[in-house]
């Protein structure tokens, strides 16, 4: 298990590329294993310093699992896919070597991650979708008019016809930041995969997220029903890119992806701990 860090003067940090099986692909996440929780303001300061789309903090829950919280550079979020996958990878590789199943307790629910061969499988919620109209602000932000628009409990889902439109999209990110949602997903049928997507979340300090596991809580129900499939293969078309293999069930979405460790290190708080927000 995790060794305590006296006076919280140093914190272990792992940086893991998630939803990829090669270094410098997928979505990099920072993972900080703790002996006990840190103050949210300190977590936020660390996430801002890391300047990755997500930093995950985990600590034992006393029942064999872990509490988990996720922070972007600007805010805490209620669900993150790639940082959860990265956290499970860190547990299985470094904290409990050989562990094939990890249970995380978030502020919202219990999330289970299982090792499936070379991949890790996230057991995530299935988000309901509500049809919506493409607003003038959304059209201006994307620079195109989507064929369909849907709302999930968190994001706007914009559907276009051609994967090339997703690949070449150059949105007006400040304009997207004015929309009443956390993120904007743009998606289209895929070539060689079932569908492709990109994800923009400027309200959370993430102009574009490289690979977004949580977006697939909405994407997989949409494409699964449209294609009549319960097993779908997805690709996110960010410059780094990533692949996801997903299963749709009546209430859940199972999301599988690989992970590679880029670095291990320590955050040194030292004598400055008194100056750090509590």
Image (cartoon, grey):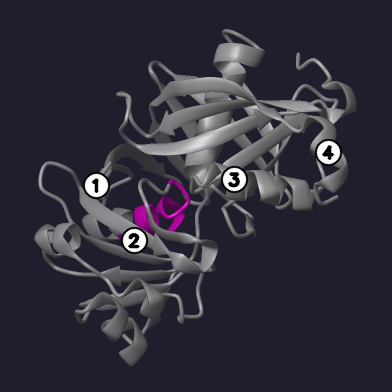
Residue sticking out furthest to the top = 98
Q: Are marks 4 and 1 in contact (CB under 8 Å)?
A: no
Query: N-terminal of the two: label 4 or label 3?
Result: 3
Please name the residue shown 50% across and 74% down the image.
181
Query: N-terminal of the two: label 4 or label 1?
Result: 1
Q: Residues within 10 Å of mark 2 (few under 14, many from 20)?
A: some
Q: Are marks 3 and 2 in contact (CB under 8 Å)?
A: no
**How far apart, in angstroms, are the residues tagged by discs 4 and 1?**
37 Å
Query: N-terminal of the two: label 2 or label 4?
Result: 2
Q: Nearer the viewer, residue 240 or 278?
A: 278
Q: Secondary structure at mark 4?
A: helix
Residue that badge 1 annotates: 239
Q: Is residue 210 above or below residue 90?
A: below
Magenta stretch, overall SS? helix
**How far apart, in angstroms, are the residues tagged by discs 3 and 2?**
36 Å
Residue that badge 4 annotates: 273
Q: Are marks 4 and 3 in contact (CB under 8 Å)?
A: no
User: Percent from the top left, x then y, of residue 159?
Assistant: 25, 69
Q: Magenta stretch?
A: 213-222
Q: Residues within 10 Å of mark 3 (few under 14, many from 20)?
A: few
Query: N-terminal of the two: label 3 or label 2?
Result: 3
Q: Secondary structure at mark 2?
A: helix
As drawn, is 261 to the left or to the right of 91? Answer: left
Residue that badge 3 annotates: 49
Q: Secondary structure at mark 1?
A: loop
Q: Quadrant of the N terminus?
A: top right
Residue that badge 2 annotates: 222
User: Percent from the top left, x then y, of residue 44?
Assistant: 68, 51
């Amino acid at each position: 298990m995790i060794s305590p860090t006296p006076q919280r003067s140093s914190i272990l940090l792992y940086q893991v590329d998630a939803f990829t099986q090669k270094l410098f692909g997928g979505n990099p996440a920072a993972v900080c294993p703790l002996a006990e929780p840190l103050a949210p303001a300190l977590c936020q300061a660390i996430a801002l310093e890391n300047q990755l789309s997500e930093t995950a903090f985990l600590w034992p829950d006393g029942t064999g699992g872990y509490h988990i919280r996720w922070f972007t550079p600007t805010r805490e979020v209620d669900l993150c896919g790639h940082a959860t996958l990265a956290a499970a990878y860190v547990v299985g590789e470094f904290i409990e070597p050989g562990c094939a199943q990890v249970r995380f307790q978030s502020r919202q629910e219990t999330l289970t991650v299982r090792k499936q061969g070379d991949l890790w499988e996230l057991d995530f919620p299935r988000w309901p979708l509500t049809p919506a109209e493409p607003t003038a602000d959304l059209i201006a932000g994307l620079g195109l008019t989507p064929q369909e628009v849907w709302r999930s409990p968190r994001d706007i889902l914009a559907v276009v016809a051609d994967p090339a439109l997703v690949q070449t999209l150059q949105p007006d990110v400040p304009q997207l930041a004015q929309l009443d949602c956390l993120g904007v997903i743009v998606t289209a049928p895929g070539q060689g995969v079932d569908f492709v997507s990109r994800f923009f979340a400027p309200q959370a300090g993430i102009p574009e997220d490289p690979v977004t596991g949580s977006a697939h809580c909405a994407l997989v129900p949409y494409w699964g029903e449209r294609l009549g499939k319960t097993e779908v293969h997805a690709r996110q078309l960010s410059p780094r890119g990533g692949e996801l293999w997903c299963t749709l069930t009546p209430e859940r979405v199972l999301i599988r992806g690989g992970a590679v460790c880029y670095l291990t290190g320590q955050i040194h708080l030292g004598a400055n701990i008194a100056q750090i927000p509590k």
